[in-house]
Amino acid sequence: MRIDILTVLPELLKGPFEHSILKRAISKNLVEVHVHNIRDYASGRHKQVDDYAFGGGAGMVMMAEPIDKAIGSLKGKRNYDEVIFMTPDGEKFDQKIANNLSVKENIIILCGHYKGVDHRVREHLITREISIGDYVLTGGELAAAVVADSIVRLIPGVISDETSALSDSFQDGLLAPPVYTRPSEYKGWKVPDVLLSGNDKLIGEWRHEQSIKRTIERRPELWSEGSDDYSE
Ligand code: ADE
């Protein structure tokens, strides 16, 4: 899988891909992540990427031309399954969308900034618009990192324990059960006996019960969605 991220602030996206699991996924060639500076596609001496909004109003708008050229340059080299725009008015990101995107070959993620992007970009170049939640960030970069992280960890081989991604919260529509590690008792705080029993069947049942209990307590709307298929 290849992810190309377009931004006016490439420095903001350096950190997330240079550590731990994402770094390893990249060095094992399980995924390629390329960050591009939109300014490199801007014309003129000033390499301008934004301008005043037609009709007035506060805030600058990202210009269509540099974005079009950046996307055009990438599309000239390979086919893309999706050109995603990160925006608070997009569809709300969830595990189902992460699963869907993790099986794509090539995707572009465009990060918005300032007051937004010229709407013609959204009309003519973008195939999908995603929000990571009902709050407004200063730009789409952190949102793009969230989306890329959640996709990459689903690619087979990225997480060492293959079953680990499958037992994540949300993967089966349930929140994950509690986990514990050594010591089995700390300051008198005890690990539930069943987890020390060595009985895989009982442990599996306990974890499933805990998942259901936590889902009902914390996210009742997920429980009532019940039979929802998370694999789409
Ligand atoms: N850009 C600014 N806020 C955002 C959000 N909540 N989700 C995605 N992109 C954004």
Image (cartoon, rainbow, N blue to C red):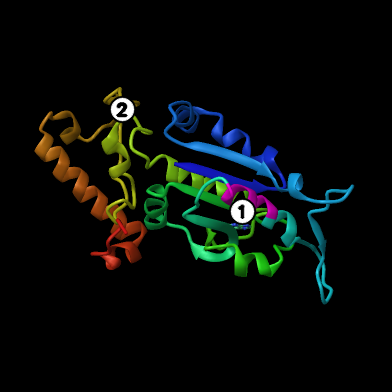
What is the residue that sits farthest to the right in this orientation? 45
Viewer-nearest residue: 60 or 186: 60
Mark 1 and mark 2: Cα distance apart in space? 40 Å
Mark 1, Cα crowd under 10 Å, few <14 / some 14-19 / many 20+, is many
Mark 2, Cα crowd under 10 Å, few <14 / some 14-19 / many 20+, is few
The label nearer to you, 1 versus 2, is 1
What residue is shown with label 2? 181
Is residue 226 in the magenta section?
A: no
Q: Residue at x 76, y 60 (%)?
A: 63
Is residue 74 in the magenta section?
A: yes
- Percent position (x, y) of residue 190? 27, 31
| Amino acid on which disc 2 is placed | Thr
| Amino acid on which disc 1 is placed | Leu
Secondary structure beneath label 2: loop
What is the residue that sits farthest to the front in this orientation? 76
Viewer-nearest residue: 141 or 8: 8
Q: Residue at x 56, y 36 (%)?
A: 16
Above or below 128: residue 17: above
Above or below 119: residue 204: above
- Percent position (x, y) of residue 128? 51, 62
Magenta span of residues = 69-76
What residue is shown with label 1? 110
Quadrant of the drawing holding the N terminus: top left
Secondary structure beneath label 1: strand
Q: Residue at x 29, y 31 (%)?
A: 161
N-terminal-most mark, 1 or 2 = 1
